Image: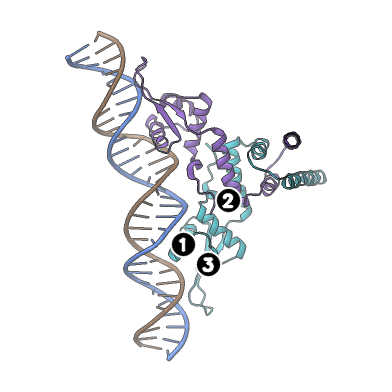
Chain colours: A purple, B cyan, C blue, D brown
Amino acid sequence: MASDDRTYRLGDLQLEIMKVLWRLGSATVVDVHEQLVGEPLAYTTVATMLRKMEDRRLVAHDAPSGDGQGRRFVYRPLVSERDVTRGMAGDLVERLFEGSLASTVSHLLEERDVSAAELAEVERLIREHKRGRAKRR
Amino acid sequence: MASDDRTYRLGDLQLEIMKVLWRLGSATVVDVHEQLVGEPLAYTTVATMLRKMEDRRLVAHDAPSGDGQGRRFVYRPLVSERDVTRGMAGDLVERLFEGSLASTVSHLLEERDVSAAELAEVERLIREHKRGRAKRR
DNA sequence: GTAGCAAAACTACCGTGGTAGTATTACCGC
DNA sequence: GCGGTAATACTACCACGGTAGTTTTGCTAC
């Protein structure tokens, strides 16, 4: 039933935190906290979440080498944006569309307001993809 | 942060149950249970889940009208497959791709093994979609 | 060396999905 | 009407995401 690999089932906050880490490369709790401008969260909420994410091997922190700035942990991502995006998107395509890309695209075209520009962009992407395929062959 | 409408954040089992109900139109706990051939679940697990889903207004059951077959509840979906699919897919597109269809399709093309047949099907869908657009204008 | 502060650790709580055992209820056949 | 059975209701438990308060720890400046 759906994908068993729960590694990439991130909640909202977890995903937001990962996005910050991907963007910055690495960051302290303070950094992450102040990047989360959306909902105002307690500092400790972010710290707790980062610790939980460390348990789940989503992030890691370097040992606090006494380089001058206290003992602040510096967190870095252990999973790539690519992998997480692929995992989450793939999970959904499996769960909702039985793995069919065509069904997925069909649904997105039908149910979302797609601007002409965006549609053109999608067509361009497909042409480009086909060219890539051909070359690889 | 992402979508607030949690109505359509279904778990694995919930989605599987909804799929059965969408397929059959309506069903008793027995029906649902025996349709879930994947992981073997206790009968009461399915019953409990259906009750929880009723609390969340995802399903409803008809009052047990004494039509002969005991008091078996007949459950039916309160939300359409369309709405749930749109909700879940939309949620993901927002969360991962900032709402961009192009980014979404780009990712799917890059990261999944897309067969030539499937690619052709996608192209067909887009042509068809454009024709629909044109007609509507 | 110690006081103060800042950071991390610990603890706690809620909601919900998932799982299932036990208790209760309601129907049906005799 | 009553007993048996089948169905629902109740209860309980775990995991995890999310949220945050309280406690402990460790650095740094004096």
Tell me: residue A127, above or below residue D13. above
Can you identify the residue that label 1 sits on?
B41
Q: Amino acid at mark 1?
A: Leu
Q: In the image, what residue occupies the spot 60% across and 51% down?
A: A96
Q: Amino acid at mark 2?
A: Arg
Can you identify the residue that label 2 sits on?
A95
SS at mark 1? loop
Chain bearing tag 3 is B
Q: Position of residue C1 (x, y in %)?
A: 17, 14
Q: CA distance from mark 2 to mark 1?
A: 19 Å
Left or right: where B41 falls relative to B95: left
Q: Residues within 10 Å of mark 1 (few under 14, many from 20)?
A: few
Residue B34: mark? 3
Which quarter of the rendering shows the C terminus of chain B? top right
Asked where in the image residue B35 lies, by quadrant, the reply is: bottom right
Q: CA distance from mark 3 to mark 1?
A: 9 Å
Q: Residues within 10 Å of mark 3 (few under 14, many from 20)?
A: few
- Nearest the viewer among B132 and A82 is A82
Tell me: residue B133, above or below residue B55. above
Q: CA distance from mark 2 to mark 3?
A: 20 Å
Q: In the image, what residue occupies the spot 56% across and 46% down?
A: A91
